[in-house]
Image (tube, grey):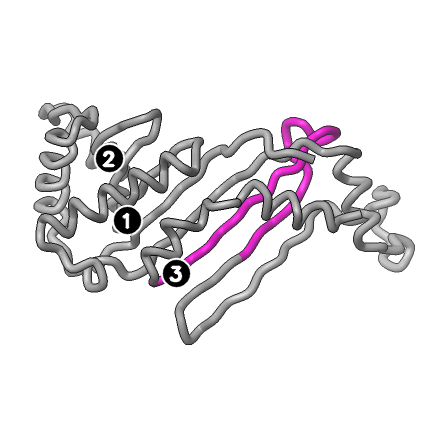
Amino acid sequence: MQVDSYEPYHIGSKLNPATNFDILKSRLKEKLGAAGYSTKSESQDEESYLIKNPIEILATKKNTKIEFNKIAQALNVIGTKPEDVSEIFKEIMNMLIDLEYEIENLVVIFEVLATIIVKADDKPLNVLNQTVSIDSNSFPVKDVHNWGVTGIRLGGENSLKNTFFSVMIEPNPTSQNTKFRAKLQYQSREMENVQTFFESLDLKIITLMKQLG
């Protein structure tokens, strides 16, 4: 097994609803432009577009985008390379501190979302059904034969620290015979934990998945 790609890797910051989002976006966008990020000014047409589309891309760098989701009230960093996403996330947090925002009061929760495509050594459905043995005859379904395990979900939480983790492992819908898709979610109040979550992630997901079958 080996990691094929991240589609994508996402670090989100759910913001305090009392935040003046327009001012935050304006000040952050100015900082991003000064730091060499690619930004563009809004035209009247774009402002009208944002009313219909609640996701605004503030800037891009290293094929990674920084976006603001108006409905979710979240500032997101999204790309295909975890190390670049994590580096840019750290830069943005430092910019917000420079703008005199208190991160512990600005951000309600941090979240990592990742869809990881993994090349399989065997047909993924075979591997999953070797992991969990199910007798389909125990629950007969009309016109459906030999049904079985199509995915496995693992996870846990610590309610005292507001942390949560889950991973769903299943065949990749567009390459079901050769690849797995692992959909991962991690939430934490600790910025450092989210910032470093990507470290050794390839090794950790492969080590986990090799226990299947």
Give how far across and how far down residue 55 sits, in percent.
Answer: 28, 37
Distance of mark 2 from mark 3, alpha carbons?
A: 24 Å
Q: Dividing the picture into quarters, in which one does residue 15 lie?
A: bottom left
Which of the 4 image quadrants contains residue 5?
top right
Q: Which residue is mark 2?
A: 56
The reply to whether callout 2 and callout 1 are in contact (CB within 8 Å) is: no
Circle 3 sits on which residue?
188
Name the kind of residue labelled 2 in the image.
Glu
Position of residue 73 measured from the top left corner of the image (x, y, whole percent): 26, 50
Looking at the image, tell me whether mark 2 or mark 1 is earlier in sequence order: 2
Horizontally, is 70 left or right of 133 in the view? left
32 left or right, relative to 64: left
Q: Nearer the viewer, residue 23 or 4?
A: 4
N-terminal of the pair, mark 2 or mark 3, is: 2
User: Which secondary structure, mark 3?
Assistant: strand
Number of numbered discs on residues: 3
Q: Residue at x 43, y 38 (%)?
A: 82
Residue 17 visible in the shown view: no
Mark 1: amino acid:
Ala
**Residue ID for mark 1:** 74
Query: Residue 124: horizontal and vertical position, in percent?
Result: 75, 38
| Numbered range of the magenta stretch | 166-189
- The reply to whether the C-beta atoms of the residues labelled 1 and 3 are less than 8 Å apart is no
Residue at 70 percent of width and 31 percent of height: 176
